Image: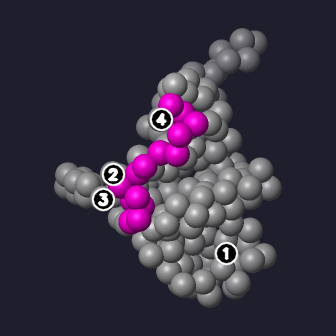
Amino acid sequence: MPAKPIAPETLQLIDAVRDALQDCAAVEEKTMFGCHVFMVDGKMCLGVENDELLVRLPPASHAQIAEMPGVRPLSSRGLMDGYFLVGPTAYARRDQWLYWIGEALAFNPLAKATPKRKTASKASSETDSKKPGDGKSPAGQGTGSGRKRTRAAPKPADADAPRKHPIFDSE
């Protein structure tokens, strides 16, 4: 079954997150949890699901954040403490947007990275294709589908001026 096309509003929100992360050194974009997510330094930090912003925040503050208007936990069963979907009413103003982006980026260095799993086929191909004594394996070479950006893009001349983005209501 072909993938469902992404709505223009979702694409605008993805672009806004991409813009917010332009100064981060190691950003990778993936699809996880049915969302377009942004991995920062190998850890899920932000994402977009339809018109909602996915943020990863400290699990210790889960109950407090879940009570905020326009915010809901990613998992209703309590399986993913610290992961929230923020609705448009909670990020519509620039100060709200900056709050969520800032909180997610502030928590990112403290977040645990999930170790990459070896699949059964990779593990068997690694042992089968490894040459004795060479210490190298073709299975370790990246073939992931995520896009990696490992450098900050050069800033345009008007980079210090506040950017307008269509996701903000009042601008």
Task: Give the amino acid at mark 2.
Answer: Leu
Q: Which residue is mark 2?
A: 11
Q: Position of residue 29 (x, y in %)?
A: 49, 43
Badge 4 or badge 2: first in the primary sequence: 2
- Residue 71: image quadrant is bottom right
At label 4, the amino acid type is: Arg
Q: Distance between the Cα atoms at labels 4 and 1?
A: 27 Å
- Chain part drawn in magenta: 158-171
Kind of residue indicated by mark 3? Glu
Between marks 1 and 3, how big is the CA–CA gap?
Answer: 27 Å
Question: Is residue 101 toward the left or the right of residue 35 in the image?
Answer: right
- Mark 4–mark 3 Cα distance, whole angstroms, equals 21 Å
In contact (CB < 8 Å): disc 2 and disc 3: yes
Instruction: Identify the residue position indicated by label 3 in the image.
Output: 9
Residue depicted at x 64% and y 38% = 24
The C terminus: image quadrant = bottom left
Residue 70 at what x, y percent from top left? 50, 80
Q: Which-is-in-front pick, marks 2 and 1?
A: 2
Amino acid found under the numbered disc labelled 1 = Asp
Residue hosting label 1? 81
Picture disc at residue 144: none
In this rendering, position of residue 40 left or right of residue 11: right
Q: Secondary structure at mark 2?
A: helix
Q: Residue at x 62, y 36 (%)?
A: 23
Query: Mark 4 — residue?
Result: 147
Residue at (49% x, 50% y) in the render: 17
Crowd band around label 1 with a 10 angstrom C-alpha radius: few (<14), some (14–19), many (20+): many
Between residue 70 and residue 80, name the one nearer to us.
70
Q: Earlier in the sequence, mark 4 or mark 3?
A: 3
Which of the two labelled residues, at mark 1 and mark 3, occupies the earlier sequence position?
3
